[in-house]
Image (cartoon, rainbow, N blue to C red):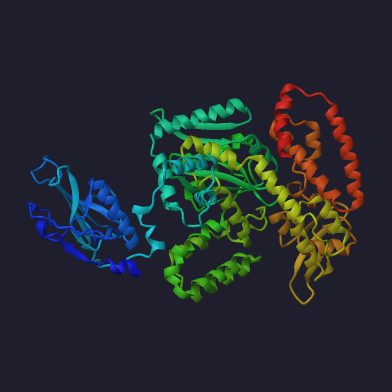
Amino acid sequence: MSEEAGSMLVAYDDPSDQRSLSLDDTSSTEESPGETRLSLETANDAIPYIGQRFATHDAAYEYYSEFAKRCGFSIRRHRTEGKDGVGKGLTRRYFVCHRAGNTPVKTSTESKPQRNRKSSRCGCQAYMRISKTTEFGSPEWRVTGFANHHNHELLEPNQVRFLPAYRTISDADKNRILMFAKTGISVHQMMRLMELEKCVEPGYLPFTEKDVRNLLQSFRKLDPEEESLDLLRMCRTIKEKDPNFKFEFTLDTNNRLENIAWSYASSIQLYDIFGDAVVFDTTHRLTAFDMPLGIWVGMNNYGMPCFFGCVVLRDETMRSFSWALKAFLGFMNGKAPQTILTDQNICLKDAISTELPTTKHAFCIWMIVAKFPSWFNAVLGDRYNEWKAEFYRLYNLESVEDFELGWREMVCCYGLHSNRHMVNLYSSRSLWALPFLRSHFLAGMTTTGQSKSINAFIQRFLSAQTRLAHFVEQVAVAVDFKDQTGEQQTMQQNLQNICLKTGAPMESHAATVLTPFAFSKLQEQLVLAAHYASFPIEDGFLVRHHTKAEGGRKVYWSPQEGIISCSCHQFEFSGILCRHSLRVLSTGNCFQIPDRYLPIRWRRISIPSSKLAQSAPNDHTERVQFLQNIVSSLITESAKSKERLDIATEQVSILLSRIREQPISLHGARDFSSINRNL
């Protein structure tokens, strides 16, 4: 507590207005007409004093509020009294410390859930009483009672500003926040932007992130039926502007919106190449309407998340999930993913087995691990982190036999035989443990880094929801192609000068074909391959680390057919050849990686040239993507030497001259005016 606050701990009462100091007393006594003597010479306006006068009771409240803020507490209006009876005029008011009184006992009802919030009230007796007087002709208010004794700690100046009474959002700031919300940025980002705009230090705005979220929540409390109509109108409007935008919806028996799903033209195009492995995240909800939200996300060739589609559901039943999956397949022209990753939802699991019978269904490991603290923290106590490390070790094993043995030992070591969560995890092990999934393509989305990347991507359009119709706009902003292209170019620039580490022809060849993200993964395996030895066996090769005398991986290679496979199944799992296969290729004097093991989804150009030649891009997004892919490769190849750069500069100058000579239609001019601004 500050010295200033300590010096203000005083209590006094006007003898002309004697009352009990009990703040719970609701009785009223008549004020004595005795004379009040004011000492103007000794009065200190920094501290309330008996006889201090105010023109209105609101002025007295503001004064006492400022005093309280300096001391380290806040106030609230406690009680009002009328001298001449009810309805005859207000004559006395009490302002008390925010911790005055005691927590009222609430009557619980079975139909209404109770909020178990801890109250801040502790019976504090600090107060200021004012009474109305007309003895000098005009009505005014004077202080007739004051006590500043607190039975709790007072806050320091850097803490008191966080009390609700002193946290306010001005109308101008409200408008600014709502504008930010429409762009889809997070509340945290809003706070940082406003701190920069107002030139205040982080954390010193007159409101907190919680206040901003409450403000946004207040704007969401709208008529759900009207919101649903707005959402449908928004989707129809987008469809009119972009015929390639797709959406489906269902109505219930009362003709109200039940489910709705949508996807964008760019998302459908991306899915055609990167839809081999898909995450269907159904762990989020639209808070304002308490509706489940499903988001289809994948990973592009630059190792970054890409958006495929979105669905809002009435409930989480098998019927709803089946409808969502059918709608998604319709958007994607009936093309099902090879693998789909989801949460541990039984209804969703059943829907996938029915609607996607050829798709491998697996559980997202990061969605499982996110539940571990609530499942095992209390059970394991100090051993929780040790157990978690052992779980990850088992999860990453290659052999099913090693996993089974290790799991039994772990359960015995930590005494988890009867733990229901462990029992459920083991029964579903084939859906989440890598030893059971390595022969299925997951695009690397099971790694911790990629899970964080996907979660951060989803939060970009979940963190600042406003109205439901605006949510569709926010998703569109978050998945905007220009934004994704900018991120790709940033990663390209960061990695385009990556050094060749082995000097092997296979490495230099792969560097010209794969994106920097995919090449870095392959390069890791190439470096490790040098530590392995290969031994010819009857139907292939045995490859093992040079320090090992036993074990190893079995590799089959047919040079004539250009086929190579390894028992570790890394290529099937990630689309990147393993160190064992690379060792065999190197031993066999193979100077280039076979074309089939440099998959299109990991190459620099997203869309195959043959496909682009067959069908020239028609809409704005396709043209932009086509050009960006070509320019990206041009930059990478040209920057490798001065000679290449000179050739590129000369040829690009000639190309630009030829392009400028070509006439353009009005429609094309409108589309490409925005392209020039973005390239």
Quarter of the image with the N terminus is bottom left
Query: Horizontally, is 475 left or right of 20 in the view?
Result: right
**Residue 409 vs residue 592, the one in the foreground:** 592
Instruction: Single out the residue that lies furthest toward the front.
Output: 41
Query: Horizontally, is 649 left or right of 303 in the view?
Result: right
Q: What residue is rendered at 84% in x and 65% in y? A: 502
Q: How many marks?
A: 0
**Residue 420 vs residue 672, the one in the foreground:** 672
Residue 164, x across and y down, in percent: 35, 54
Q: Is residue 447 visible?
A: no
**Residue 327 vs residue 246, the one in the foreground:** 246
Q: Is residue 676 visible?
A: yes
Q: Is residue 505 above or below residue 602?
A: below
Quarter of the image with the C terminus is top right
Dividing the picture into quarters, in which one does residue 526 lie? Answer: bottom right
Residue 629, x across and y down, in percent: 77, 42
